[in-house]
Image: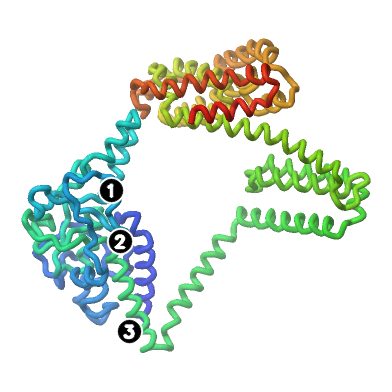
Amino acid sequence: MTKRVLSQLVVSAASLSLTAAFAPSGLTNIAHLSSNNHLATRISAPLSSSANSDEVIDADIIALSTNPTLNLTPEGYGFSSPISRVMKESGKSGYYRAKSSESVVDVMGKIGKNEVALVFDEENDKELMGIFTDFDFIRLSTEQARARTEEESATFMAAPVSSFMTSADKLICVEPTSTASQAVAIMTNNNVRHTVLVDKCGPNFSFLPGTSVNGVVSMEALLRLIQSDNRLSYDKLSQKFPGLANKPIEQMREELKSQANALANNEETAKKDIIRVGTAILGAGSIALYATQSAWLSSHAELAMIAIFLLGYIGIIFEEVFEFNKAAVALLMSTGLWVTYADFYGESTGIASANVLEQLKEQLAEVSDICFFLLAASAIVEVVDAHQGFKVVTNLITTKSKKGLFWVIGFLTFFLSAILNNLTVTIVMVSLLRKLVPNDDDRRLFGAMVVVAANAGGVWTPIGDVTTTMLWINNNLSTIPTVTELFLPSLVCLVASLFFLVNNIEEDSSLAESTLPPPSPLAPRGQVVFWTGIASLLAVPVFAELTGLPPYLAMVSIFAAQR
């Protein structure tokens, strides 16, 4: 008997801890509160407000008093705690009293931690009109996201809280004599995390107009109290039976170890472990060579640099296989190359010379030019997107023919890549395709076309591709010959690829299921930001040709002007 009670206690405490941990994100099922049928298992029917707290409300709901010897906590504690005790232990009413005319932003500023707002009538301050919770705020935010302008968006936060509250006729209530088990069941059955404590509930725990409101009970407060009571009961039971106290816990620990071993016993985990061990050995050996000022490294510095370069590129190429971060691999490779070159190459004495430091500064300056240029370009695109400037493009997409859409997306990507850089445009267009093309197979084909079009479009301007930009910044190519000589070959590449790929498109009515919002007028500010952004980016090569200064200066100036 004692062993069974202890086992049930440990299982219940562990399950309840998990439930309490996930309670803030919402509960949809109470099936896992306990494996004991005498505890809450599920809810199959609405509850009656006239039920006594000690009475079995439903065969599938809590029946703590039917067999007191199996209860984990004394009567009046744990799941059998009355709601009045829950409110007393929490030490607060659980809500902010708001007037119906108060704005959403004011109410949000006054709601305390883990609280909600009860909205009362402006004229009759005893008449409860509804409740404003985090779910209502999410609904408000969803509608706010559809606003076309900043002014329209601001009106949502300034609107009366009564416009977005859950009305009183939809409230779920409990009475002071209701138990914690009933409250948990009620909230779970109705998929809510707060219930109003009143003197008397209506049918099916509905709110009766005119009844007195005593507070708001949250799922978090309920589970915190239940878990605390169960923990105390477990401690007392462990003191009473010290020889048995740790056995359920030790058994659970052994089971967890067995599960961990089972999870680790697979090819994928073994591959990861081998790669990690190999990388650790290689790293330790390299550090030892550098730390000991190895004579071999001094006499074979060129070979060591080639090996570092090859290993680095292998790590970058096979990043998915090795699960490496290619940026981290590139940085480590760069550091290894510079240390080897500075301290061991040629006539080096183990300390970087002034000449090497000067070379490092020059290389850093070149890399910084490219980084500043790309960062500013990406920021400009983000500013345009923040002002919904790309509606200028999406509003043009009205065709319901998949083949027609294929050509439209292809040419849009081609020309936008030449101005905004192909990587950014690829990200923007792929995000658009997720809303525009509902069929997965079609979306993959459209995505392949976007990549081809973006690469073709990024070639024929100095700012369309990272590689072209690097060559242009280092004065390895000029603007006008690049545009005039590469535009036609790039266009031919695009058209030929589209002709080949479009034959794989099958016409149907799937575009009717698109989630892209219908075309809507763009605010004047959005149009200004979009067109000035495009014009400014086109002016970057002109700035570089006329002034002879690095192009990133023009790019950061454009970004500053847009802000």
Between disc 1 and disc 2, the foreground one is: 1
Q: Which residue is mark 1?
A: 135
Q: In this picture, is 439 found above or below 503?
A: below
Q: Report if residue 153 is visible in the image.
A: yes
Identify which residue is drawn at 34% across, 29% down.
149
The tag on residue 31 is 2
Name the secondary structure under disc 2.
loop
Quadrant in which the N terminus is drawn: bottom left
Instruction: Pick the residue in front: 196 or 308.
Output: 196
Q: Which residue is mark 3?
A: 1
Instruction: Pick the residue in front: 520 or 123.
Output: 123
Name the secondary structure under disc 3.
loop
Instruction: Pick the residue in front: 247 or 348.
Output: 348
**First in sequence: mark 1 vs mark 2:** 2
Q: In this picture, is 526 found above or below 141?
A: above
Disc 1 marks a residue whose amino acid type is Phe
**First in sequence: mark 1 vs mark 3:** 3
Q: Check disc 1: other Cα within 10 Å, few if <14, some if 14-19, many if 20+.
A: few
Number of numbered discs on residues: 3
Q: CA distance from mark 1 to mark 2?
A: 23 Å
Identify which residue is drawn at 33% across, 73% down.
228
Q: CA distance from mark 3 to mark 2?
A: 25 Å
| Res 513 → quadrant | top left
Between disc 1 and disc 3, the foreground one is: 1
195 to the left or right of 416: left
**Residue 122, horizontal then vertical, whole percent:** 12, 47
| Res 222 → quadrant | bottom left
